[in-house]
Image: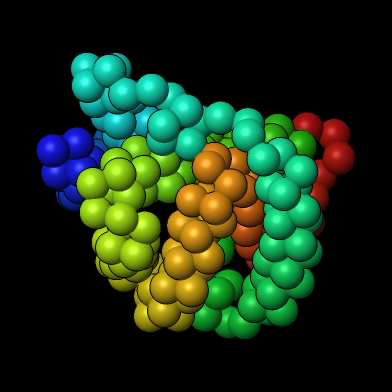
Amino acid sequence: MQAAYSISAVTIGFIIYHFAISDNRLERYFIKRDGAEKAKVSWVIFQRLTGVVIFGIIPFILIVVQNVDFERIGLTFQNKESAITWIFGLILLSVAINSFVAKKPDHQDMYPQIRTPQPWGKSLLFVSALTLFLYTLAYEIMFRGYLLFTCRDEMGPVLAITINTSIYTLVHIPKGWKETIGAIPMGIILCWLTLKTGNIWIAVVVHVAVAWSSEWFSIYYGKKKLEIGN
């Protein structure tokens, strides 16, 4: 029964999130409130924090209501040595791939998400990195935590990974076919490692590394100057 709750929570949560961040009326509100240039920052920050609330708060409430043990859904630090080894290797691989992919014009068309023409100062780099981290943490708690482990307990690992990767792939469709296809092996690997180690931290750290390096390489190759004084 908990698997049904988790699948429903992810589905409903993503529907709410997608239409919230696609609402032109909300975007116009930010433009009216902050001005066109500042809204290019505040609108993206709002989108990420909305994801934090939806992907973080919804599963947390369900976890508490259903009295699910945090360790049962991967919020534990067991098998640290094995996890650290995998984290180190996957971060190197992810950063290497992003250093190449970020040069591509189609990647530059999408990233960085914050499309301000102003130079990226320290404050913007910090705020963007922090909100990316919080969003990714909430995202992984939902996908590789609550959804994966509740499905594993009721359906077994193979079907749990299949369901998780299928939904994970579908939510990448708005980002284009390349990210959608790439989400398949990424989803399988992160699910397998999460179940193997019994914790979500490989998925969290690697996903954060992918998000950060993608943004930073995009800024670098996009020839955006970084101010030192902000």
- Comparing 207 with 129, the one in front is 207
Tell me where residue 64 sits by quadrant.
top left
**Residue at x 56%, y 30% (from the top left corner):** 76
**Residue at x 27%, y 18% (from the top left corner):** 67
Residue 25, image x and y in percent? 19, 43
Q: Is residue 179 left or right of residue 31?
A: right
Tell me where residue 108 sits by quadrant.
bottom right
* Vertical position of residue 154 compared to residue 183: above or below: above
* Vertical position of residue 49 compared to residue 88: above or below: above
Quadrant in which the N terminus is drawn: top left
Can residue 12 be seen here? The reply is no
Q: Is residue 188 left or right of residue 161?
A: right
Residue 97, image x and y in percent? 69, 74
- Comparing 12 with 69, the one in front is 69
Can residue 88 be seen here? The reply is yes
* Vertical position of residue 205 compared to residue 225: above or below: above
* Vertical position of residue 42 compared to residue 168: above or below: above
Residue 180, image x and y in percent? 39, 74
Rendered image coloring scheme: rainbow
- Comparing 54 with 153, the one in front is 153
Residue 162, image x and y in percent? 31, 66
- Comparing 117 with 109, the one in front is 109
**Residue at x 64%, y 78% (from the top left corner):** 101
**Residue at x 63%, y 34% (from the top left corner):** 78
Quadrant in which the C terminus is drawn: top right
Farthest residue toward the right?
228
